[in-house]
Amino acid sequence: MTTDSDILSAMSRTLGDLLGDDSIVLTPTTRRGDVDGWDSFTYISFIAAIEMEFGVKFGVADVESFEDVGAIVRRLQALRGK
Amino acid sequence: MLWLPEISGFRDRLRDAVRRPPEEIFGALVALSRHRLSALETLQLDRALQHNDAPERQPTAVRLALLGSSTVDHLIPGIRVAGLRHGLSIRSWLGSYGQYRQDLCGPSPALREFDPQYIVLSLTAREIIAPIALGSTAEEAEIALKRGVEDLQGLWARARETFGATVIQQTFLDTSAPLFGSFERRVPSSPARLVRRLNELVIEAATHVPVHIFDLALAAERTGLDRWFERKVWLQAKMQIAPHAVPEYGERLVRFVAAQRGLSKKCLVLDLDNTLWGGVVGDDGIQGIILGEGTARGEAHLALQRYAKDLTERGIVLAVCSKNDPDIAGRAVDEHPEMILRRRDFACFVANWQPKPDNLRAIAAKLNLGIDSLVFVDDNPVERAAVREALPMVAVPELPDDVAGYVECIAQAGYFETSAFTADDRERAQRYTDNLIREDDLDSAQDLDSFLTGLNMSAVYGPVQEVDIPRVSQLINKTNQFNPTTQRYSLEEVTAFCRDEANTVLQFRLVDRFGDNGLVSAMIMRPVGAQPGVLDIDTWVMSCRVFGRKLEFEAMNIAVEAARERGAGVLRAKYIPTPKNVVVRDLYERLGFVRIDSGGGETALWQLALESYHPRSTHITRTKQP
């Protein structure tokens, strides 16, 4: 069982790798604007990397509707639970 | 990119690389680039490269402009990392989204200032085919496509004349959904038919003007479109090349650029046993190797030979580098009826017991080729690692475990990329054939010790248990090379030896950082009738899998201890020469034994006084089994 906090730390590491910033810590309430450099381009790469890491595929509607990191984690857990 | 070896702990290794002294960082990054990296790892490596730019240490610098009609920004890290892998330091310039026409015809001052040597046009087909209605006739479609290609030719001319650049035109991917199914290509203006025809016309146009065709469409036909295109990211970000394809896109584009800089490989160096044929010819005999029609495994080895033969016809030089007895290996190649490749097909034929890196150096020197133009193909992961470590500039494909995949692995690696096929290419193989070079006086100056140390070898040894007997019996009956007596024993006889308390029967496994090589050696020591304190090495066999690892030294260290524990003071041994066991002719001499026969006969008798034995130094630690 992968916990929400496992997913959060994996996501933090992935975004850190993408942006070259080891200090990034994502929380469920983090929004894109809260992280320096997390633009729409990096967002696409981030989603692609998370999909590869967890073996899931988000829908285009999912990706457009994520308000914050918590929403990504919830959707990821739902996809993994299927 | 399965031909590249996997890497574990990438983040840590990258961190270590950038913390090295400045003069070592670049080399460490190059080493990382030669692994199978994910898109994210590629991005990280590229960032480290940008932060640790060391132009003075870098190879050929290349200025490359990437112009696209879709989002191509994300491709740049993959291109630069592939440059690192191929010895090119790539400076890139990125056109604005969809502005390729303006950039070329404007012309863009920024692009002019960048002064590109290469302009890559990475375009989607839709600009050209979207206006063509589905109901168009074949003639109407052809006219529209030709107009599109003429427009492209105008852009190529601009790129050449305005910027003095070499143009690389990427072929068009067909990302359309089928409308008609099997009938698709019979409809003159179906999207699938149009894209295919467009690519044909572009390739045709390239025969008349100086432009290079980067055939991504062909690659996608071979690998599947999914490997490149993902509709979701197309919808989200208008990326025609999906993020996961970034490493491979860079690799395929840059190897094509590298080819134009003369950096493609020129010589394919092949191992013999379990590469060109199945089995070990020194053990199995020429008739015993697996090769040829009739078995899938034999056909798979044959397919590799056929592929190598085809490569010679396009100008690639072949060589052999094998740990083998030179006479046996040479006869196998020339006499086995199923061989496609014969000795005359190889410009250099090296079979001996020297370390392979030494032999590869010698091959490059004899063929007068740069060592970085060699590709070394070997089924054995230990040999591959030895070569990668000693000669990182040699390309070493990470062959799959299954021989069925060998050809595909080598082919996909694209070592012999080219942008021309000339009369000179067609005749090259013949020129080398006329000048056949045989193996002779190869020097061995390689620092073997550091390689052996790095293998983290451990000998796991102990008395032969019941469960080991089938394998020990197989070794005794199959081993021809490391077998000083070539004495065969049935399963029952081996069982009887093991059960007799008077005998010492040892088994040795070798574990290294690549895993367990299994039970690779066995030794039977028996008391000599009336002479107390004397043990005879009745049988000693070792698999050729572990030759050159000094296991024979460590095994003797262990055997001497075991003999001492039994109260023995002397070991005796025999060498009975056969055509196949030359490799152990000097074995006992190297272990400090003294020859005690008159020297006249074929068989040599050896003796060792245990009190005078100094343990041999090896790089193998030990683990005793009960």
Image: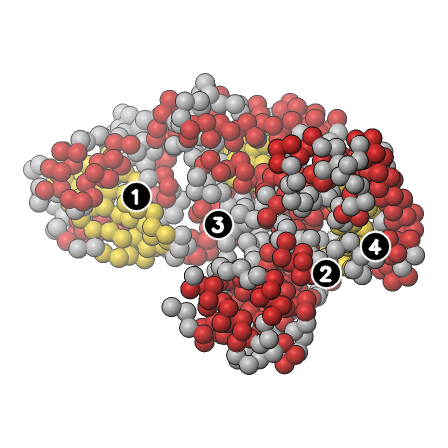
Say which of B126 and B227 sits in front.
B126
Give me the residue at 49% from left, 59% from top.
A55
Q: Residue B613's x, y, as percent?
A: 26, 51
Circle 2: residue type: Asp
Mark 3 vs mark 1, CA separation in Å: 20 Å
Mark 4 vs mark 1, CA separation in Å: 62 Å
Q: Looking at the image, is B449 positioned above or below residue A61?
A: above
Circle 3: residue type: Ala
Q: Chain of mark 3?
A: B
Q: Which callout, 3 or 4, points to the residue nearer the camera?
A: 4
Circle 4: residue type: Tyr
Q: Looking at the image, is A1 positioned above or below residue B608?
A: below
Circle 1: residue type: Val
Residue B100 is labelled as: 4
- 3 and 4 marks on the same chain: yes
- 2 and 4 marks on the same chain: yes
The residue beneath circle 3 is B385
